Image (spheres, rainbow, N blue to C red):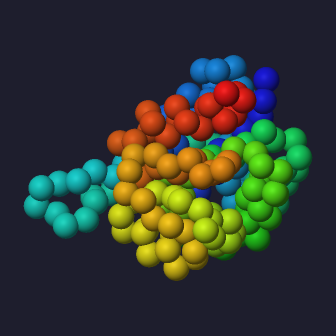
Amino acid sequence: MKKVLLVIGDAAEVFDTLYPLFRVREDGHQVVVAGPEKRVYHLVQHDRHPDWDITVETPGYRLAADIAFRDIKPEEYAGILITGGRAPEYIRYDKHLIQVVRFMMEKGLPVGSVCHGIEVLATADVIRGKKVTTVAKCRFDAEVCGGVYVDQEVVVSGNIVTARTWHDNHAWMREYMKLLNGR
């Protein structure tokens, strides 16, 4: 059984978080939920409404973090998944999280990111020269930090697997699990 980090914070998107949580467990691996602190976080649901120009955010489930970023020993993990939603807007400034992401990249371990999760990868400076995808409104974050933006449901670039939004979870996790399971 491998251990995989699932990175969250307040306003992490429900589907971006729960789908990978259960998908990784489905293959018999342990998921360790990590947040800025070891506490309960509020997930949110993002949805499009025909009369809105942007997504509407409503409260979702709550999820407890098993570990705080500062307490992670990255050598104990086989990979990392970074959820979307608004959480990446502030967790990307956590130096401990950035160190963990850089460690995973240096070791060639599977690094997954969906939606706004690209903001964490961009801050960690690990997407320079790599093809990535993300929600369209984060294209700037990817490109200004050296990533090559591609608008498709999933992009695999070395050990990085990125997806646009929760609508692409099936493709995102299919490709992530191939890396995690060594296929």
Rendered-image quadrant of the C terminus: top right
Rendered-image quadrant of the N terminus: top right
Residue 44 showing in the rendered view: no
In the picture provided, is 75 more to the left or to the right than 62? right
Q: Which of 108 and 69 is in front in this view?
A: 108
Q: Which residue is drawn at 46% across and 46% down?
A: 154
Q: Which residue is drawn at 61% across and 68% down?
A: 129
In the picture provided, is 5 more to the left or to the right than 76? left
Percent across and percent down for residue 128 are 63, 70
Q: Residue at x 38, y 51 (%)?
A: 152
Q: Give the vertical position of 67 relative to 126 (above or below).
A: above
* Count of marks placed on residues: 0
Toward the left, the furthest residue is 51
In the picture provided, is 149 more to the left or to the right than 151? right
Q: Give the vertical position of 53 relative to 107 (above or below).
A: below
Find residue 181 and report its image quarter: top right
Toward the bottom, the furthest residue is 144
Residue 2 showing in the rendered view: yes
Percent across and percent down for residue 33 are 68, 43
Percent across and percent down for residue 99 are 80, 64
Q: Give the vertical position of 80 relative to 97 (above or below).
A: above
Percent across and percent down for residue 6 are 65, 44
Q: Which residue is drawn at 67% across and 54% down?
A: 35
Find residue 52 and report its image quarter: bottom left
Q: Which of 11 and 114 is in front in this view?
A: 114
Find residue 117 and report its image quarter: bottom right
